[in-house]
């Protein structure tokens, strides 16, 4: 008897066919390596042209079709510490505040470690930085210039732009 339908309806969702193998792989990555002081959070696109309900198209990537995986890696050697496979939109549509949720999930394994997380503009949020700081993790990233959290003294003035 197949348990795929039961597994697919549970928390594993679309990842049910590979969930156990994926979970054991991530577990092995975490058990067999201790990260340095700096880690990086980013997305990766694993090239895939087959049939898959969560395959994505990313025109900016060299291989445009594939499976998107969010990763946290050691900044010195790119060793994988934790990862999540993006399984597509949920039944209620796109997830709100997905980027900060991803960073929170990926950094659970390094909480209270004093490490620094570097990420790009997609993941960087002021409130997320404060939340991570409360867990003894610092965040380094780029903020969009229109964020209200940026003090006016940090904003480029018109006078500066004209010179």
Image (cartoon, rainbow, N blue to C red):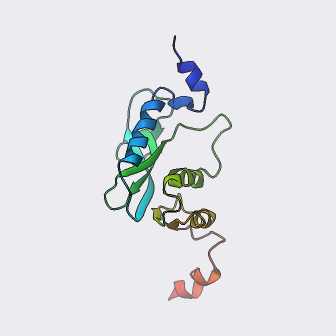
Nearest to the observer: residue 30 or residue 45: 30
Residue 3 visible: yes
> For this rendering, which residue is in front, 89 or 137?
137
Question: Where residue 71 appears, x then y in whole percent?
Answer: 44, 50
Up-down relation of residue 102 to residue 140 (above or below): above
Determine whether, in the image, residue 9 is placed left or right of residue 49: right
Q: Position of residue 153 (x, y in %)?
A: 61, 84
Which is nearer the eye, 37 or 93?
Answer: 37
Residue sitting at 38 percent across and 56 percent down?
34
Q: What is the x, y in percent for residue 63?
A: 35, 42
Q: Residue at x 43, y 59 (%)?
A: 40
| 157 is higher (above) or lower (below) than 25 | below
Residue 39 lies in quadrant: bottom left
Vertical relation: 46 (above or below) 3: below
Query: At 56% across and 81% down in the image, what residue appears?
Result: 156
Q: Residue at x 45, y 54 (%)?
A: 42
Residue furthest out toward the right: 92
Estimate the x, y position of residue 50 in percent, counting from the top left: 39, 28
Give the residue at the far top of this rendering: 1
Q: Is residue 141 left or right of residue 36?
A: right
Residue 60 seen in render: no
- Res 78 quadrant in image: bottom left
Between 62 and 138, the one nearer to me in the picture? 138
Relative to 17, residue 90 above or below: below
For the image shown, how many numbered marks are present on the structure?
0
């Amino acid at each position: 008897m197949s348990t795929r339908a039961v597994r697919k309806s549970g928390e594993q969702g679309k990842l049910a066919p590979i969930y156990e193998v994926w979970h054991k792989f991530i577990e092995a990555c975490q058990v067999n390596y201790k990260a340095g002081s700096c880690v990086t959070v980013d997305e990766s696109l694993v090239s895939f042209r087959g049939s898959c309900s969560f395959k994505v198209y990313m025109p900016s990537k060299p291989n445009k079709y594939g499976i998107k995986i969010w990763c946290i890696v050691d900044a010195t050697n790119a060793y994988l510490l934790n990862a999540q496979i993006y399984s597509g939109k949920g039944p209620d549509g796109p997830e709100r505040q997905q980027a900060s949720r991803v960073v929170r999930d990926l950094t659970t394994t390094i909480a209270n470690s004093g490490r620094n997380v570097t990420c790009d503009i997609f993941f960087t949020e002021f409130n997320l930085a404060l939340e991570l700081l409360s867990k003894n993790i610092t965040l380094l990233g780029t903020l969009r210039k229109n964020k209200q959290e940026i003090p006016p003294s940090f904003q480029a003035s018109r006078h500066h732009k004209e010179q």
